[in-house]
Amino acid sequence: MHQVLAQIKGGLIVSCQALEGEPLHNSFIMGRMAVAAKEGGAVGIRANSVPDIIEIKKQVELPLIGIIKQVYGDNPVFITPTMKEIDALAATGAEIIATDATNRIRPEGSDLVTFYNEVRSKYPHLLLMADVSSVEEAIFADELGFDIVAPTLYGYTEETHGLKIDDHEYEVIKQMVKVVKRAKVLAEGNVTTPEIARSVLDSHVHAVVVGGAITRPQIITKRFVEALQK
């Protein structure tokens, strides 16, 4: 097993992200979030944007899943959508690069197969993570050669709009574990409590990714407020 994959096996990866307009949108703050995650026992970090990744890498020596969220017009593919973002992430030293691996056409007009082959040709040793929206897409990404797959985009595509990872007790994750043959499956999406994290890890995923439940205080606060108002 690749050293980085071995390093994150069975552990918690914390997504340290704050988008423009959110209270914690600041690379320094994301760096401190990563330090806090490490002190809490996280085995890896997921981060968005070159400035955030550079700052986080200064602060912690944990494997990092890098993405760049970039919107191109009305194209729906926005997670590391083109080679421009791949090149930028590769330059940061991120150990893993995640990209939208749905069946949608990308901003520059290519399909996933063409894009994947271009990335693999230029960066043969990079670990590549497929953010998918369905079990079928997970199978396809696995067969293409992605090292990691996760249902990150489940509920965020036209076909899955309105669905949540936790529908039917995280069945989409359990199905991916059963059918993905080579890639490592990460649980990502709507893992909101330690108990849920433990439960999905027991379904034999490689590791668990948690974001908003740890690193978005406005969301955490809202959950408490809503509970008090019931």
Image (cartoon, rainbow, N blue to C red):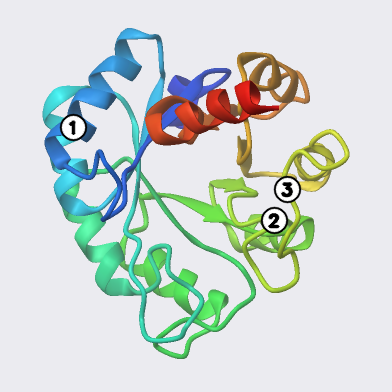
What is the crowding at mark 1: few (fewer than 14 residues within 10 Å), some, or many (at least 20)? some
Q: Residue 49's x, y, as percent?
A: 24, 53
Q: What number is the disc on residue 29?
A: 1
Q: Nearest the camera: 188 or 185?
A: 188
In primary-sequence order, the first of circles 3 and 1 is 1
Look at discs 1 and 2 and give the one toward the viewer.
1
User: Residue 169 bears which disc, if any?
Assistant: none
Residue bearing the label numbered 2:
138
Instruction: Calculate the distance from the C-alpha at mark 1 to the C-alpha at mark 2.
Output: 33 Å
Q: Residue at x 17, y 48 (%)?
A: 92
Please identify the quarter of the rendering in which residue 186 is found. top right
- Residue picked out by circle 3: 164
> What amino acid is labelled 1 in the image?
Ile
Q: Between residue 89 and residue 196, name the one nearer to us.
A: 196
**Disc 3 vs disc 2: which is toward the camera?**
3
Identify which residue is drawn at 44% across, 25% down: 214
